[in-house]
């Protein structure tokens, strides 16, 4: 059952309102945060393979698809939210969006799948973005030189990322701390 809407900011679905399912603990990424994050990424979305690991409302994944991501994979553990994401993708005619109902830290992409743009916005009471990033690295799901947008609770202690990541930008807005990180290029002898 929808409890509200999110608005796509730019791209082919610009200004389109998407329903937000009513679910306990669901916290849509604020428009201001999405707009800043996607301004940072504006020249780096087209043609990327994107993962929205804790999809929730799908705001980040739908925004990336609207702006030209080649493929968007959304992973959401709550079945009602996953169904809502599938319906929204179908209503948009977005064949480039794939939704998986699974736990973020046990889900595995196809063995040859590598993501070059990842969004990590876990529930604030859930695993840390650093844990999720380490998991993705452990299962070799992240492409070399990938970009990762991370959102977390401003009050939460900033946990360090696994080695091999460089902070590009970081800001706070209200209760949200968010940043853009880049995977360091592989070492070439």
Image: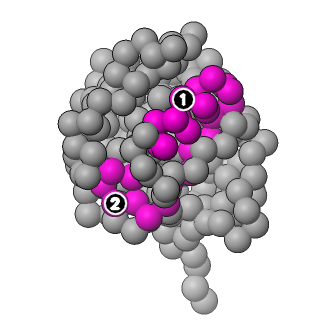
Residue density around tag 1, few if under 14, some if 14–19, many if 20 or more, within 10 Å? many
Cα distance, mark 2 to mark 1?
A: 22 Å
Can you tell which mark lies on residue 84?
1
Placement of 135 over or under 139, stated as above or below: above
Q: Which residues are magenta?
A: 65-90
Residue 29: x %, y % from top left: 39, 28
Q: Nearer the viewer, residue 90 or 64?
A: 90
Name which residue lies at 61% across and 32% down: 82
Residue where numbered disc 2 is placed: 68
Residue 149: tell me if it is visible: no
Name which residue lies at 78% across and 42% down: 106
Image quarter where the C terminus lies is bottom right
Name which residue lies at 25% across and 56% down: 42
Instruction: Tell me if 124 is positioned left or right of 93 in this view.
Output: right
Residue 147 sits inside the magenta stretch:
no
Residue 85 sits inside the magenta stretch:
yes
Residue 3: x %, y % from top left: 43, 12
Which of the 4 image quarters holds residue 28? top left
Please identify the residue farthest to the right as the structure is shown: 106
Placement of 65 over or under 7, stated as above or below: below
Closer to the N terminus: mark 2 or mark 1?
A: 2
Q: Nearer the viewer, residue 154 or 47?
A: 47
Please identify the residue farthest to the bottom as the structure is shown: 189
Placement of 81 over or under 97, stated as above or below: above
Judging from the image, what secondary structure is the residue with disc 1 in? helix
Can you tell which mark lies on residue 64?
none
Instruction: Tell me if 169 is positioned left or right of 57 in this view.
Output: left
Name which residue lies at 40% across and 25% down: 19
Judging from the image, what secondary structure is the residue with disc 2 in? loop
Q: Nearer the viewer, residue 112 or 131?
A: 112
């Amino acid at each position: 059952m929808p409890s509200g809407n999110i608005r796509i900011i730019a791209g082919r679905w610009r200004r389109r309102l998407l329903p937000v399912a009513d679910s306990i603990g669901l916290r849509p990424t604020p428009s201001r945060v999405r707009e800043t994050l996607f301004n940072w990424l504006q020249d780096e979305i087209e043609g990327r393979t994107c993962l929205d690991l804790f999809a929730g409302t799908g705001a980040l994944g739908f925004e990336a698809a609207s702006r030209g991501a080649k493929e968007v994979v959304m992973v959401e553990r709550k079945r009602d939210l996953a169904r809502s994401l599938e319906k929204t993708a179908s209503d948009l005619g977005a064949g480039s969006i794939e939704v998986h109902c699974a736990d973020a830290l046990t889900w595995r992409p196809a063995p040859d799948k590598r993501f070059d743009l990842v969004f990590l916005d876990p529930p604030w009471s859930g695993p840390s973005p650093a844990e999720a990033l380490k998991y993705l690295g452990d299962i070799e799901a992240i492409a070399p030189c990938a970009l990762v947008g991370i959102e977390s609770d401003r009050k939460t202690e900033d946990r360090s990322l696994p080695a091999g990541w460089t902070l590009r930008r970081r800001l706070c807005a209200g209760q949200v701390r968010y940043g853009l990180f880049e995977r360091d290029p592989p070492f070439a002898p």
